[in-house]
Image (cartoon, helix red, strand yellow):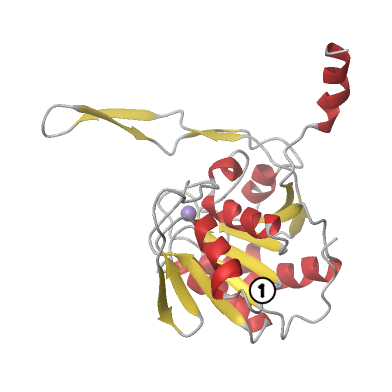
Amino acid sequence: MHPPVADLSSVRILVSNDDGIGAPGIKVLEKVARSLSSDVWVVAPETEQSAAGHSLTIRRPLRVRRVSRRRFAVDGTPTDAVLLGINHVLKDNKPALVLSGVNRGGNLGEDVTYSGTVAAAMEATILGVPAIAFSQYYGPDCPVRWSTAEHWAPEIVRRVTRAGWGRNVLMNVNFPDVAADRVTGIEITRQGKRKIGDELSERFDPRGDPYIWIGAQRAEDRGVRGTDLEAVSRGAVSVTPLCVDLTDRGTMDALAECFR
Ligand code: MN
């Protein structure tokens, strides 16, 4: 278990994301972290890395650029940023908590398998540091409601760190696309279904060669009670514990039978 933390005020917090160090969401999360602790550091990707998943850069060198005091950019993926943040930038006094996000857009259902925001939290978890991923869901034709994330995130960080959680587990938090005072509550959910990639737009470049854009269209299963997607669609903040160990224990016994 990650031990419960009663007082966050001097806990070293590392903030990262996948939208890049200049994204509006990381400014929101840095502000949230600073409202909780006086020891906040940012190590984040230099450029946007959405849907980078848990990709690690091993075929080229990485550069760490000091942006300002306690703020560093890495020219790699979210995983690179968290790895270098913990094992290089802060190696002499490692963070006790990693916060990732706030992502521009929800990380719901199968999104978590593509998400760089979730992967940053996953990397921290694998390195032994408790981590929480934050995403602000938003609909079409509407500005992102960062104020909802900013309002609700501190309470969630305080509550989950006060409880502590398993060493194999990270927290995936999604804020709904409603004003902060319209949020219906905080709900503990499981991963729903929301596969991206149903819509492919094939076009032609100026030289006549075809190319394909993967569209944002998703086959969403919003109606299934108890899921992240359903809770957020209804106006609740969704908190889903995700396990880094992807083993399906239910299938193990059946499979062992097959190979007897
Ligand atoms: Mn992103």
The answer to which of 141 and 243 lies nearer the viewer is 243
Q: Position of residue 215 (x, y in %)?
A: 39, 36
Residue at x-position 43% and y-position 56%: 142
Q: Is residue 146 left or right of residue 187?
A: left
* Amino acid type, residue under disc 1 in the picture: Pro
Q: Is residue 90 left or right of residue 209?
A: right
Q: Is residue 171 left or right of residue 135?
A: right
Number of marks in the image? 1
Residue 209: x and y in percent read: 17, 27
Res 202 → quadrant = top left
Residue at 49 percent across and 73 percent down: it is: 27
Q: In screen coordinates, is 138 left or right of 153?
A: left
- Against 7, is 152 above or below? above
Considering the numbered disc 1 on the image, is that residue within a helix, a strand or a loop?
Answer: loop
Q: Is residue 202 above or below residue 55?
A: above
Instruction: Locate residue 228, reporting x and y percent.
Output: 68, 46
| Residue named by callout 1 | 95
Q: Residue at x 85, y 60 (%)?
A: 1
Quadrant assignment, res 11? bottom right
Query: Is residue 238 at all visible to an observer of this figure?
Result: no
Q: Nearer the viewer, residue 138 or 5?
A: 5
On the image, the x and y values in percent for residue 204 come to 19, 29
Q: Nearer the viewer, residue 257 or 215?
A: 257
How crowded pointer 1 is (Cα within 10 Å; few <14, some 14-19, many 20+) is rated as many
In the rendered image, is residue 219 in sight? yes
Q: Quadrant of the C terminus?
A: top right
Please say if 207 is above or below 127: above
